[in-house]
Image (spheres, helix red, strand yellow):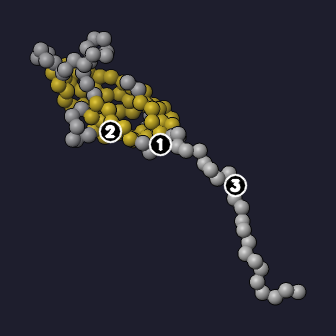
Amino acid sequence: MDLTFAVGQTAQGIVQGLLADNVTPSGATLANLTYSFATSGIATAALDTTTPNAIDATAVSVGSTQMGFSATFTDTNGATGTASGTCNVTVTTGTGPAPLTTGLGINWSTPIGRKK
């Protein structure tokens, strides 16, 4: 599944083994999870030490890249191996509220001091 988020946002992805249809979870136990970005500087990521098979990503700058990830697995039938996957990562500027301010003005105080 691809990820689109705005600069400054974070997201967590849970990596899981998939059956041949690339949709149905296989139930495999994963280990040695690694990840990498094709282009650096668009997003950062770190393995989450409190959630199994989780990668926490942070949007850094506007752009698109691909993230690759891999792990060793043990299937429910005892088979073992290595599997990998990819996803597209897109970082946008965000969709916050539209600015209300459209310009600047100045209000002067009543002049003080001597008149001529």
Name the residue located 78 percent from the left edge and 87 percent from the top edge.
Answer: 113
Horizontal and vertical percent position of residue 76: 13, 17
* 8 sits to left or right of 96: left
Name the residue located 22 percent from the left edge and 41 percent from the top edge.
Answer: 49
Quarter of the rendering occupied by the C terminus: bottom right
Most distant residue in the left direction: 78
Horizontal and vertical percent position of residue 111: 77, 80
* 78 sits to left or right of 45: left
Quarter of the rendering occupied by the N terminus: top left
Q: Nearer the viewer, mark 3 or mark 2?
A: 3
Q: Is residue 36 above or below residue 106?
A: above
Separation of residues labelled 1 and 2 (CA atoms): 14 Å
Q: Which mark is residue 103?
A: 3
Horizontal and vertical percent position of residue 8: 44, 45
The kind of secondary structure element at disc 3 is loop
Residue behind mark 1: 7
Q: Which mark is residue 81?
A: none
Residue 80 sits in quarter: top left
Amino acid type, callout 2: Asp
Name the residue located 15 percent from the left edge and 21 percent from the top edge.
Answer: 74
Most distant residue in the top direction: 20
Most distant residue in the front direction: 110
The disc, 3 or 2, on the residue closer to the chain's N-terminal end is 2
The disc, 1 or 2, on the residue closer to the chain's N-terminal end is 1
The kind of secondary structure element at disc 2 is strand
Amino acid type, callout 1: Val
Residue 41 visible, this orientation: no
Answer yes or no: do the residues labelled 3 and 2 have beta carbons within 8 Å?
no
Q: Nearer the viewer, mark 3 or mark 1?
A: 3
Amino acid type, callout 3: Gly
Residue 86 sits in quarter: top left
Q: Which mark is residue 56?
A: 2
